[in-house]
Image: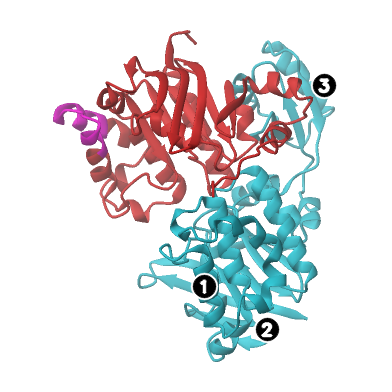
Chain colours: A red, B cyan
Amino acid sequence: MNSRTVIRTKNLTKRFGSFVAVNHISFEVSAGEIFGFLGANGAGKTTAMRMLCGLSRPTEGEAEIAGFDVYRQQEKIKKNIGYMSQKFSLYEDLTVYENIRFFGGIYGLRPRALKEKSKALISRLGLENESNKLVRSLPLGWKQKLAFSVAVIHDPGIVFLDEPTGGVDPITRRQFWDLIYEAAGRGITVFVSTHYMDEAEYFNRLSIMVDGEIAALDSPSALKQKYHAASMDEVFFELARRAVRQSDEP
Amino acid sequence: MSEVVFDRIVKTYQRNSIRALDDVSFSADRGSLFGLIGPDGAGKTSIFRILATLTLPDRGQARVSGWDVVKDYSKIRQVVGYMPGRFSLYPDLSVGENLSFFAALFNTTVQANYDLIKDIYRQIEPFKKRRAGALSGGMKQKLALCCALIHRPSILFLDEPTTGVDAVSRKEFWQTLGNLRKQGITILVSTPYMDEAARCENIALIQNGKILSINTPQKIAGEFPETLFAVRSNNMSGLLRDLRGMSGIGSCYTFGEFHHITFRQGIENPQKWLVGELESKHHHEIEFMQVQPTIEDCFIRLMKKDE
């Protein structure tokens, strides 16, 4: 793993009125790292992720994503990252090929590159016979793998995965992690949120947000040692139960 | 006495092209907490929709509280509470308005049944005037549960109430279910989280519209036919690759901070053999132990067998 920093935030903050959703978070992520972004519902994860993806303007603080500034270069950020969420990943009523074309186009690939990439992607996933089928008809496991491959079709520096394995069967969940490792091996930084605590063990490093702040950030083994915990589940529980704010402010 | 009976149900969609439920049978006793455990697309929602009399089975029979889901649907609707997987309250009504509305639908009032929802409702009461659509995920789920309970049903159908909910809130939610059960309510709940299975009295493991196994969580785990081991070393991804390449290893998959493995038959002293092999592949800090199979281990094995 080389140590080039691809995500750098300093005192990054987002306020909605008097409510501080994200409160002065500072951290760095290196190229090729698999970085976990954990926290209870309402801790501020989604708001923070939206700022990192160039979708939401910070109230104060600094952040640089893939070398681009979150205030001035939001469009450049969007072109240089990939994004996949469990809830919205592919269009069910487009075919496999159409989805690849569509997202490749959105990510700014030129027609010729797009054609080559689509072909390579379809053959790598073994979907030659399915490329003209509607995504709706694919088993969930294939959909997830396709969604991930589409999110990195433009070889982004960073891919953001928002609960990518929610609701997925235990075998597919593990196959999905093979894809994550493979992408990281190619130098793509993988930024993941998950509610599965066994998956927290697979991160190189992870942060746990509590009440808008980063309460802990380290490797899984260092965190377990620090909190005298046998598993990441215990670490998470220990930290998240300290939350004082309601997930909704009255 | 069975409160919920599902007997050889077949359900297809899109002119038989999708077989959502393939000859599914199970029953849940009155007052029990029964879990439907399986991933998205397994058929869990179809089971709930049939039991809640919202869709008809192609074949087979289902009964709720002794009533037939086809003939006696209006009787069933009086006694069940249903919380769908997708948020289905009115987003532009406030928290309080939603609750009053669902109470009114069943000809009752919030006050009359307040004792039943008190513990849950107290947590969302500060946001009583907020539009339901503006609540966070966890709060929406609490409100949906209150609305499903407000007519004091004797049976509760909860379709993936903990999906997308963080680990701490999930624990709290299961405590709430335990309390509701003490009030005599029969609860049928589905989840894709295997670790929640242990909270149920009986579970059905479901995949691709078929039941893989039904029993108590303890019995299902006890029926795991092989001896299961956990192993780790200083290089976990290399370890996974090396283990998969060894002919003496039956199955091998990641499991949190360990990999879980089984051995093929005919290896004497597997521990000694494995540690020797791994040391020759330059693994250090090797830890190896026998472990009790979890529901997730059972599910993985049953899925592989099914293929």
Q: Position of residue B170 (x, y in %)?
A: 66, 49
Quarter residue B79 falls in: bottom right
Q: Is residue A236 left or right of residue A213?
A: right
**Range of magenta residues:** A103-118
What residue is shown with label 1? B49
Q: Position of residue B284 (x, y in %)?
A: 73, 12
**Amino acid identity at mark 1:** Arg
Quadrant that contains the N terminus of chain B: bottom right
What residue is shown with label 3? B272
Chain of the residue where label 2 is placed in the rendered structure: B
Q: Is residue B80 left or right of residue B22?
A: right
Residue at 29%, 30% in the rendered image: A120
Q: Nearer the viewer, residue B105 or A6?
A: B105
Q: Which mark is residue A96?
A: none
In the rendered image, the residue lying farthest to the right is B269
> Few, some or many C-alpha atoms within 10 Å of disc 3 (few <14, some 14-19, many ≥20)?
few
Mark 1 → mark 2, Cα distance in angstroms: 16 Å
Quarter residue A239 falls in: top right
Q: Position of residue A121 (x, y in %)?
A: 31, 33
What residue is shown with label 2? B65
In the rendered image, the residue lying farthest to the bottom is B71
